[in-house]
Image: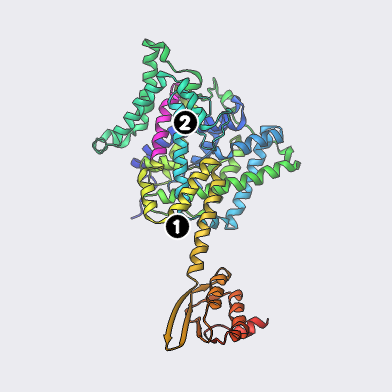
Amino acid sequence: MKKSFFSNFKYDGPAGLVVYLVALPLCLGIALASTGRPDLLFSGIIAGMIGGIVVGGFSGSPLGVSGPAAGLVVIVLTALKTLGSFEALLLAIMLAGVIQLTAGYLKAGVIGYYFPSSVIKGMLAAIGITLILKEIPHALGYDKDFMGDETDLVQMDGHNTFTEIYYAFIYNSPGAIIICAVSLGLLILFEMPFMKKIALFKFLPGALFVVLIGALLNYLFMQSVPQFVLSGEHLVQLPVASNAEEFFGFFKFPDFSAISNPQVYITAFTLAIVASLETLLCVEATDKLDPYKRTTPTNRELKAQGIGNIVSGLIGGLPITQVIVRSSANIGAGGKTKLATITHGTILLLSAILIPAYLNYIPLASLAAILLMVGYKLSRVSLYRSMFKLGWEQFLPFIVTIIAILSSDLLKGIGVGMIVSIYFILRKSYKNSFHYTKVKDHSKETVTLTLAEEVTFLNKVSLNEALINLKDRSTVIIDGSKSKNIDYDVLEIIHDFKTHASKLKHIHVETINIPEVIQTAKH
């Protein structure tokens, strides 16, 4: 009997709540960093809602969570200056969605399957380290950089990650340190097996108690230790509407008169390409973290992202991608299906309508504790051990990807990791192009070169070297009976050796199942 959509709500409901608590400050922080305008903070919340409800509904990813992403901050900020208005940017976001939707129908999602496992795991570890480093200042009460910054070392506030930590230790807040320490203690407690046996805590996640206790501690500071009180930038700052008209004023609409501006199309293509690549990377990473090892249909994901960005641009939201921090929080909280993603988007919507003022009592230090735990789970020591045991061909691309992402950004780091992985692939292809056997009978030497199943131009060098190094007056048998495909480049080398080079060294050449060597060479 087929299970109903809500049959896993006992898992997905609490997971959706955890993702909501993680997503709320990230949506606001990314919105402020992307636009530089406090009046546009709600654009991040809109993107979060759409990422949860709309993208979650159309996506085939069981655990992926979409929303505004730190990786698009610089693109959005630059586009705002170039286009001159937020409404023109919304039009570019809509067009980016159309491009993504088209790419999905053209089956461009297949690109996602070409990222090596070692590089994806390196990306996860790097994001975990970055998250820990970026959240330390918030844990200490130094909230100059926006929460949710997962980008490179250079920050929007003019510092870099390490100087930010340095200033955080100098200008720390005792109240934030206490709240974060208590929050971390609670989260560790909730990870204990005995806590998971208590019925209440099976449904209500530890993250919920963390934000409630954080807000309560801050209230107690207000009553007894005023110098510890957190306010202003140290708390969630969700825009609060005094009436329905003001609430609907948070929603913006595209400026369709900008359709003739070439910069709109340049921005749209840039957003579509970067958002799609980040989404496909996140899809691969999320599938690797999925305890059930399900596979997300990448073409359907591109279509879902496209629909999400069309809707987001239409009603005033930021561009959307699938995001690994929220997705890993979902997995860590026990989410099983995409109902968790839809639940988080629904809670974002309802809380923005019903209780925005109460959300602004939540200290960022409590949320920093939740993100620190997410970062730790992404970059556990056991991950490094397991990758090291797999050998240098897996470990080196893994480590290089981590270093490259930490020192540049996500896409550049992935590119560097891919180069290292490709090097090992080429090296293996070079070594495994044929099987070499040698038999010596008195003074005569017979060498058999059994070609691999696939022999491409990448194997030219190794095969050529083997032929050149054959001894004078020996016999060589080139056997292609196991090969399904032999490139023309390789056939040409075999033909040239057989007809010319072998005669100079008096080498006898025999070929077995080498397809039309002479005819191919003549053409």
Q: Secondary structure at mark 2?
A: helix
Q: Is residue 290 above or below residue 254?
A: below
- Nearest the camera: 237 or 255? 237
Q: Amino acid at mark 2?
A: Leu
Q: In the image, 193: left or right of 429?
A: left
State the residue at coordinates (71%, 32%). Answer: 84
Q: Earlier in the sequence, mark 1 or mark 2?
A: 2
Task: Look at 50% across and 33% down and name the residue there.
Answer: 148
- Locate the C terminus and report the quarter of the image it occupies: bottom right
Give the image's coloring scheme.
rainbow
State the image coordinates of residue 328 (x, y, percent, origin top left): 42, 42
Residue 235 appears in the rendering: no
Task: Residue under label 2, please give it.
Answer: 350
Please name the residue that numbered disc 1 is placed on.
Answer: 393
Spot occupied by residue 456 in the image (x, y as percentages of width and height): 56, 71
Identify the element where label 1 is drawn.
helix
Towards the viewer: 372 or 476? 476
- Residue 341 percent coordinates (x, y): 45, 41
Q: Is residue 110 left or right of residue 519?
A: left
Residue 99: where, in percent of width, then height?
63, 49
> How many marks do you count on the picture?
2
Q: Main secondary structure of the magenta part?
A: helix
In the depicted structure, whether residue 450 falls above or below residue 506: above
How far apart are the two marked residues, 1 and 2, measured between alpha carbons? 49 Å
Q: Given the image, on which type of amino acid does mark 1 rest?
A: Glu
Give the magenta range: 359-376
Q: Residue at x 61, y 28 (%)?
A: 36
Q: Of circles 1 and 2, which is in front?
A: 1
The local crowd at label 1, few if under 14, some if 14 to 19, many if 20 or more residues have their Cα within 10 Å, is some
Residue furthest right as drawn: 260
